[in-house]
Image (cartoon, grey):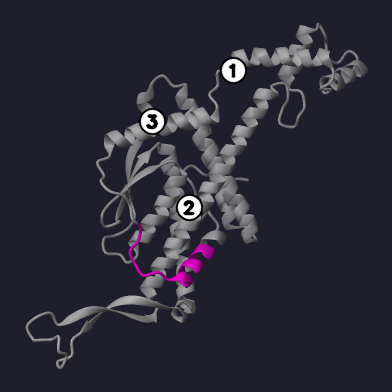
């Protein structure tokens, strides 16, 4: 049996597939933003459902280890950075293995699932666009100051034949390929994180605006028309039967839409007061605050991490970072891999 949550995953998967197959980058970005917005809505809806659940034991946050790569792999910290940026947009707290091979996630299962799906797609794209950038050799045109190890000459006055055979010095030279790769991929991850977070923020703001509109106008739908619930209440309250006199019905609707009509405005105010008494649904802001508190308490009780993530340690390459940021801006936030339960060909 397909649950509502599964159907939402299918819709997210469909949007990601549309992003991957979009004709232009602009179209792809639109599909990506819709996918992140839907993921945000899913998280809000599930958080709201949890607030009504009495048995909390099955709806608490979980801890899950996500493997990033094999020990010793070059640039592994940039893969970690990409996952952290994605996780941050999905309300996931993280700890990192000292060698960047694993990330320990603390969050709700559906949020971690979404983060893994996005990462599986984006990490492949990050590597692909980075290799294409390196192949251009553009990074070689930039010269940076870098720390290098130099060996003593036998006639060097500092060399006595018994101590260290070399020393570290600073010199200007072309950007090494590995330095370019790390800068590119870290900037790519940073930009992806910004895009996901903005899409999430925009959707939360839209939800708050809808809630404020509904609270102030419970008699109207999102198109500004009287809801069927209000029309039924109005009919019962005024012994009116819609459909018997089309002209009178039209007049009433015009009166209801007239903010200067005291009689109809008093009716709307009564309906609003009734709805406010009946409505015990927690708003988006309250739901998210409750979710954040629950996650914070879970993380505090289950994490023994010390210190904070300091990012990648390498020389700075402005050309590589600029290229990585541009790639992160235009990258389609979707991939060939579908979310679990997704049906092929879903429109």
Q: For residue 245, what is the image quadrant?
A: top right
Task: Determine the secondary structure under disc 2.
Answer: helix
Q: Quadrant of residue 238?
A: top right
Above/below status of 75 relative to 149: above
Q: Can residue 35 be seen in this view?
A: yes
Magenta residues (range)? 311-327
> Where is residue 262 shown, x and y percent of the image?
82, 14
Q: How crowded is mark 2: few (under 14 residues within 10 Å), some or many (20 or more)?
A: many
Q: Is residue 11 left or right of residue 177?
A: right
Q: Given the current orientation, which residue lies at the most extreme right position? A: 247
Residue beneath the point at 9% across and 80% down: 163
Disc 3 target residue: 294
- Picture quarter containing residue 329? bottom right
Question: Which quadrant does the C terminus fall into?
Answer: top right
Tag 2 near tag 3, CB within 8 Å: no
- Residue receiving disc 2: 193
**Residue 76 shown left or right of residue 49 in the figure:** left
Q: Which element type, helix, strand or loop, lies under badge 1?
A: loop
Q: Is residue 345 visible?
A: no
The crowding category of the residue bearing disc 3, from other C-alpha atoms within 10 Å (few below 14, some 14 to 19, many at least 20), is: some
255, above or below 157, in the image: above
Task: Identify which residue, 67 or 216, lies in the foreground.
Answer: 216
**Mark 2 vs mark 3: which is more N-terminal?**
2
Q: Name the residue under label 1.
A: 279
| Residue 85 rendering spot, x and y as whole percentages | 43, 51
Give the total of numbered labels.
3
* Coordinates of residue 106 in the picture (x, y in percent): 35, 40
Q: Say which element carries label 3.
A: helix
């Amino acid at each position: 049996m397909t649950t509502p949550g599964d159907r939402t995953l299918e819709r997210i998967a469909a949007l990601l597939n549309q992003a991957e197959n979009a004709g232009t980058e602009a179209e792809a970005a639109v599909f990506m933003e819709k996918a992140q917005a839907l993921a945000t809505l899913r998280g809000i809806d599930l958080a709201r459902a949890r607030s009504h659940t009495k048995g909390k034991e099955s709806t608490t946050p979980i801890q899950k280890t996500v493997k990033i790569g094999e020990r010793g792999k070059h640039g592994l910290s940039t893969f970690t950075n990409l996952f952290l940026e994605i996780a941050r947009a999905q309300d996931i707290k993280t700890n990192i293995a000292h060698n960047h091979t694993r990330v320990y996630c603390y969050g709700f299962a559906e949020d971690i699932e979404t983060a893994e799906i996005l990462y599986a797609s984006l990490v492949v794209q990050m590597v692909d666009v980075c290799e294409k950038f390196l192949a251009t050799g553009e990074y070689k045109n930039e010269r940076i100051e870098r720390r290098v190890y130099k060996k003593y000459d036998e006639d060097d006055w500092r060399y006595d034949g018994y101590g260290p055979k070399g020393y570290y010095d600073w010199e200007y030279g072309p950007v090494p390929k590995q330095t370019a790769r790390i800068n590119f991929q870290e900037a790519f991850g940073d930009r992806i994180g910004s895009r996901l977070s903005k899409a999430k923020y925009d959707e939360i703001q839209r939800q708050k605006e809808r809630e404020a509109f509904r609270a102030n106008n419970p008699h109207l739908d999102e198109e500004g028309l009287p809801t069927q619930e209000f029309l039924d209440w109005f009919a019962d309250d005024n012994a009116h039967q819609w459909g018997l006199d089309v002209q009178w019905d039209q007049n009433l609707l015009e009166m209801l839409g007239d903010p200067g009509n005291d009689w109809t405005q008093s009716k709307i105010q009564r309906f609003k007061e009734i709805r406010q008494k009946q409505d015990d649904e927690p708003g988006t802001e309250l739901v998210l605050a409750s979710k954040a508190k629950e996650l914070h308490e879970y993380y505090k009780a289950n994490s023994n991490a010390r210190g904070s993530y300091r990012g990648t340690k390498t020389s700075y390459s402005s050309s590589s970072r600029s290229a990585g940021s541009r790639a992160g801006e235009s990258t389609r936030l979707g991939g060939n891999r579908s979310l679990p339960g997704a049906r092929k060909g879903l429109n």
